[in-house]
Image (spheres, rainbow, N blue to C red):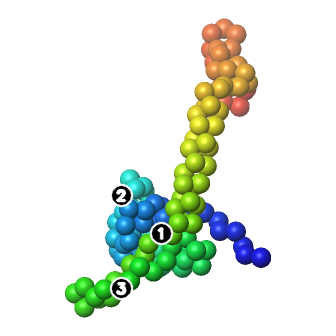
Amino acid sequence: MATPFRMTEQAYLVLLALTAEPLHGYAVIQVVRELSGGRTVLAAATLYGALDRLGAAGLVEPAGESVVDGRLRRYYRITSDGRAAAEAETERLRALAARAQEALRRRPVAQEARRRPAAGGFAAPAGGVA
């Protein structure tokens, strides 16, 4: 029985980076940085670990190699299973964000009571002791 793939944020971003076209490692790092608004900057070891796990799960596959300026570039592409996994994760995150927005719109009565001024017009200090 195969272990289910655990979709981390980094793995998700790598899959998204590969949706448009096959890319070599450094290009994946750049696209992930762009997709995350600069919040996620993958180190090479992190990227290749993620690519190995994604490959073992059948979500990405090698797409060739080339030599540029004397350095080997390995290219990777997303598989149809990888695209389906990225789409499913996108939907999961969209639904989570919708639930989060709803939760933030609601405000429990206990919080409302803490914000009302205490008798005499002064708000109680944090911890509830006046």
Q: Residues within 10 Å of mark 2 (few under 14, many from 20)?
A: some
Give percent across and percent down for residue 15. 48, 64
Q: Nearer the viewer, residue 102 or 74?
A: 74
User: From what the image shows, is residue 68 above or below residue 42?
Assistant: below
Residue 34: which numbered mark, if any?
A: 2
Please tell me how crowded label 1 is: few (under 14), some (14-19), or many (20+) other residues with Cα within 10 Å: many
Label 3 element class: strand
- At label 1, the amino acid type is Ile
Q: Residue at x 65, y 26 (%)?
A: 106
Q: Position of residue 36 (x, y in %)?
A: 42, 55
Q: Quadrant of the N terminus?
A: bottom right
Q: Image check: 103 left or right of 72?
A: right
Residue 73 seen in the figure: yes
Residue at the spot 25% in from the left edge and 85% down from the top edge? 68
Quadrant showing the C terminus? top right
Give whichever of discs 1 and 3 has the lower sequence position.
3
Image position, residue 9 (x, y; %): 54, 60
Q: Are marks 1 and 3 in contact (CB under 8 Å)?
A: no
Disc marking residue 78 = 1
Q: Residue furthest left?
A: 69
Kindly indicate the quadrant of the structure image that contains residue 27. Answer: bottom left
Q: Residue 116, relative to residue 98: is it above or below?
A: above
Query: Which of the marked residues, 1 or 2, is nearer the chain's N terminus?
Result: 2
Between marks 3 and 2 in the image, the one whose residue lies nearer the viewer: 3
Residue with the mark numbered 3: 65
Q: In the image, what residue type sits under mark 2?
A: Glu
- What residue lies at 36% left-to-right and 58% top-to-bottom? 34
Between the C-alphas of marks 1 and 3, the distance is 16 Å
